[in-house]
Amino acid sequence: MLKDIVEKAVRLVTDYTFHDRKLHRIEAGVMPHNTPSIRGRKCEDY
């Protein structure tokens, strides 16, 4: 369930950033020991 919420939040933020704010880049930082975040980042193609 948490994974679904995070995925939806990432989609909403990226849509807002690129379409509403007209920005062209988003940077995501992940701590090296946080493997769930690393996997999530890979799933979202970041």
Image (spheres, rainbow, N blue to C red):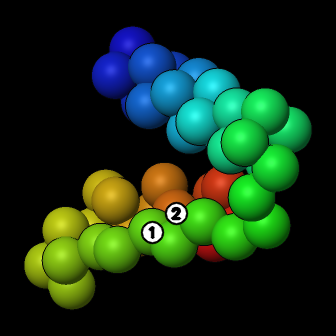
Q: Quadrant of residue 3?
A: top left
Q: Residues within 10 Å of mark 2 (few under 14, many from 20)?
A: some
Kind of residue at badge 1: Ala
Q: Residues within 10 Å of mark 1 (few under 14, many from 20)?
A: few
Residue marked by disc 1: 28
Q: Pointer 1 and pointer 2: residues touching (CB < 8 Å)?
A: yes
Vertical relation: 34 (above or below) 15: below
Kind of residue at badge 2: Arg
- Left/right of residue 34 with respect to residue 28 in the rendered view: left
User: Percent x, y for residue 44?
Assistant: 66, 56
Q: Nearer the viewer, mark 1 or mark 2?
A: 1
Q: Quadrant of residue 19?
A: top right
Vertical relation: 31 (above or below) 41: below
Compute the Cα span from label 1 to label 2.
8 Å
User: Is disc 1 placed on a helix, strand or loop?
Assistant: loop
Residue beneath the point at 52% across and 63% down: 41
Residue beneath the point at 31% across and 57% down: 36
Confirm whether residue 45 shows in the render: yes
User: Percent x, y for residue 39?
Assistant: 46, 63
Q: Quadrant of the N terminus?
A: top left
Q: Quadrant of the C terminus?
A: bottom right
Residue marked by disc 2: 41
User: Percent x, y for residue 21?
Assistant: 72, 42
